[in-house]
Structure formats: structure tokens, C-alpha cells
Amino acid sequence: MNTHSKVLGSEVVFEKAYCEYRLNRVESSLKTIESAPEQTDKLKELYGQVLYRLERYDECKSVYTDLIRNSQDEYEEERKTNLAAVVAAMSQWEKAPMEDLGLPESTYELCYNATCSLIGQGKLTEALNKLQQAEELCRVSLADDSDMTEEDIQSELAVIHSQMAYVMQLQGRTDEALQLYNQVIKLKPSDVGLLAVTANNIITINKDQNVFDSKKKVKLTNAEGVEYKLAKKQLQAIDFNKALLAMYTNQADQCRKLSSSLQAQNPGHPRPVLIQVAQLCREKQHSRAIELLQQFSDQNPESASGIKLTMAQLYLVQGHVTKACDVLRSIEEFKHKPGMVSALVTMYSHEEDIDSAIDVFKQAIEHYQSEQPGSATHLALVREAANFKLKYGRKKEAISDLEQLWKLSKHLPSADTMSFNVDVDELENSHGATYVRKKAAKVVGENPPKEQGHGEIKKKKKKKKGKLPKNYDPKVTPDPERWLPMKERSYYRGKKKGKKKDQIGKGTQGATAGASAELDASKTASSPPTSPRPGSASGSSTAPASGVVPPRQQKPSSSGATRKKAPQKKKKGGKGGW
């Protein structure tokens, strides 16, 4: 076509633009379409596709809206699907509010695109329900095709399942999400864009754990043609995760190279700088990290808030509390927020810089006095400032805050106004009021007349007599130290050590010390054997019978020493989780 452009002329404009589009020469395709002498419906269809690839969503939306309005053929459903995809992209990447264009959800493609719009708006529960609806529609539509196998259906459902897993991941259900992601990976779908997004999301779940799996998954994000299938923000997220993975795997040079490249591509984006700073902190180069943050903050003041918070954190790590306070007070966006005021006052108090802490209160109160006078935050700050000053003995300064608080309280409605619609009877009969004792009101003036024959009776409570101990003797004076523990009394001399105590457990069970001595042959005096009694069957002597079984003793070891058990080696536990 380029060779014979003079002969062919404008007859092959659509074909040329389409070839350029399929060769991923999107900019060239756009120029070819715009240079056409006549904008046919075919060119408009292709024009919408080109604008979508270039992420010019507003123009793309106008093209498809015009096509749907002015054409009636069998491709109307495809155009509505494309328009739904544009609306979803605007919701996800540009955070544009959802616009009801009256698009149906009769097919699983339309239902899926509606789900993407809901995810962009943060409506995750609704999105998950609609994804289940899209899955059902997909199964029903593909079941009619006899040539489709279950494997083919699962491959078609892969994009829906991957999106389900993403919603679960956003909801914090990471185990369920990981299971679905891995199912999609095992199917090996032909869409390299789907594989890249699924692999990237698995890497984000792994973080600095399961690094070997992440290194395998990152290869799927480098597949050929991925850059033409995904939006710029998707590609950017994948590149950020590659840099973080390099940091987690201790590839410092690779991490620096990737983060520097990202910073060159996105000069105003804070994330590449934060990745470089994280790597420097891992190398204990905190001063260099702070210099890098300060440099970025000076060059990009519009996105310096998060950077300055990181700077303050690094100063605190190094123990420079005052420097951290100075950085925090320089953040105009946050410096009057109650949380920031609380943090600054706490840090200044730690440094015993009470004047600076009071100055923080003063500036915050002045801000709310001019912007939101009498608001809950304003009153809370004044009250806390007064309490803080009283705590540190600044009574005169606290008085002015208390006076200001008293003046602000004048704006409150009066007690009569607040109690105008109160039902007193209902209040007294409420559950809480039943536990309150009611006292009869005293009658002012003359005493009421008494009935004849009845005098004024005063009820007196009878005092209960204390119980006396059983062995109480009124003639004996009680021990004045009876309330003290025995060991603390003056006459306590400790427990006596008696012979019986020492002999407990030394004899045979059930035998006394005397009996044990009698049975101990070693303690008896040696005497010659007695002569046999007449009538004895044998010539041996008889020993006295005893019904007590002697205690058994352990045999001593051959060495005569006590054996000790060798200590077992402790098993080493696994490494802790992140």
C-alpha cells in the first residue's frame, strides 16, 4: 500500500489504518484515519479502538455514543460492550463518577464491564455479586455450543475468576484470592495480559515471603506483547513491583537501576523515590535517604506531603525529634489536623520543649477560630490546650483558654429549649430510673394534722450484735495483738524443732522409732547362738518373725556416683513470618 499509494489513493485508507493498528503502530493508525477524506462507519469503529488504546477515553466515549445513536445493524451489542469498557476504564484509571448510560447487562461481557466500573468506585460487594452473575451468563451462553469443552469454558472464565480474586484481595481475603489466581495460572490462557496481571497480583500477596515463587511469576510479566495489552497504570504497577522484588531479594544494584528508570519515566511520582529510600535504609544510609527525600520535596512541592512524613520518620529513627517536628510543621495540608497536633505536642513534651507545644496548640486554635469557629474540633483543641497548660503550671495562660471555652458555650441552646419536648413521665418510668430511690418531698409550712390516738412513730434501725468466739471468757482480757498475723506478734519465737519432726518419714511405714531400732540387727549386741530347744526338728536357731516388709534400696552404680541424664539438643525452629 505504501509502494502504490499514488495508484490506490484513498481507496485503501481503512485497510492501511487497520494494518497499522494490528502492528501496534497506533499513532500511525490515528494519523491515517484523521487524514482520510471521508469518515465512514468502518473508519469510525476503528477510530474508537485506536482512541481506547491511546487511553483518550473521553473522545472514545463520544465516538461510540455517536455510533450507537446513528447506526442500526447486527453489531449494536458489540458497540455497547465497547462503550461499557470505556466507562469502566474511566472509573478505574481516572476515578470518574459512574454515569448511567442505560447499557444492558444481558451478556457476560457487558456484565463484566459493569463490574469493573463498580470496582473503580470501591463497591466491592456489589462487584463480586455481579461477577458471579457474569460467570453464570458465560456458562449458559457457552453451553449451547457443542464444540466447547469444559476446558474451553474454564479458559473463557479465566478473566472473570482473576477479577474475582482481585476483589477478594481488596477485601483482605488473600488466601481465597491466591487459590483463584493459581487456578488461572495453571490453565495457561493465551491472553498474555491476563497472565501478567494475575502473576503481578500473586507477587503483591507474597511480598517479601515466598520469594522463589515471586521470581518465577515475574517472568510472566515480561512476556512479549504485554505492553500492548495493558493500560499504562497497570504497566507502571508491574514495574514498581519488579523494583520492590529486587529489593526483597537483596539485588541492590538492580533495585537502584529499576527505580531510577521509573523516576525518569514518572518524574513527579513519589513511589520510585520511596523505593530508592527504602533500599538506602536497608543499607543503613539514612542521611543519604533524607537528602534524596528533601531534593524530591523541593522539586515537587505538590506531592511532598507523603515524602515529608517519611522524612520525619527517618529523623525519629535517628533520634532527631526536634528536626522531625520541624518537618511535620512544614506540611501545610496536615499541620492543623488533630492527629498531627497530638503527635507534635507529644514529641515536644518528650523533649521538654513546653513553649513549642503550646505554640502548636495556639496556631491550631487560631486556624479553627477563623475557619470553623465553635466546631467540635475547635472546642476539643481549646479544652486540651487548657488541660496541657494546667498540667505544666501555666495557669495564667490556661485561664484565657478556659474563658474562651466559656464564651463558646454561650452559643449552646438553653436548658429550657433542650427540655421543651421531654416527656417527664416516660423518663421517670424508664428502665434506668427504676434503680433510683425517690424521697418524698417535704411539705413547706404547717405540719399535717395527726390522727387521734396515734403518736409520731420513729423507726430506728436495730444494731446487730457481733458474734463472739466459742471459747470467749469475759473474765480474761483479750489479746491486744490478736489482729496481727502470728509471725508479727511480739511473743512469737518461731516453730520448735522437735525430735518427732526429724524422724518423720525415716522409719518403716506404720512402725515407730522404737520398733525400728529393735528390728535393726546392727544395733543389737552380739551374743552367742542359743542352744537348740528340746524337741526341735533342726539344730539351727530360729529368728523372730516380723510382719513388716523391709524397704527396698536402689543398687549403687558401679562407679558409686550419681548418674545424670545428658541434655538433649534443642531443635531449631523455622524462620519467623513477615
Image (cartoon, rainbow, N blue to C red):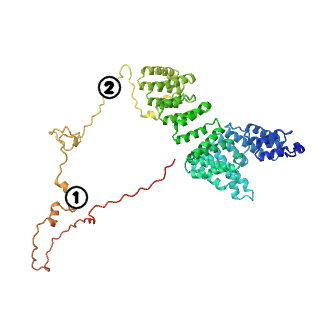
Q: Residue furthest right?
A: 7
Q: Residue at coordinates 66% horizontally, 51% vertically from top-left?
A: 195
Q: Which mark is residue 452?
A: 2
Write down the residue under mark 1: 505
Give the quadrant of residue 44: top right
Amino acid on which the number 1 mark rests in the picture: Gly
Residue 377 lies, with reference to residue 108, above or below; the image says above
Number of numbered discs: 2
Q: Is residue 183 visible?
A: yes
Q: Observer-nearest residue: 374 or 214?
A: 214
Q: Which mark is residue 383?
A: none
Q: Observer-nearest residue: 470 or 403?
A: 403
Earlier in the chain: of badge 1 and badge 2, it is 2
Q: Is residue 122 visible?
A: no
Q: Residue at coordinates 19% horizontally, 37% vertically from top-left?
A: 480
Q: Observer-nearest residue: 561 or 138?
A: 561
Neighbour class for label 2 at 10 Å: few (<14), some, many (≥20)?
A: few
Amino acid on which the number 2 mark rests in the picture: Gln
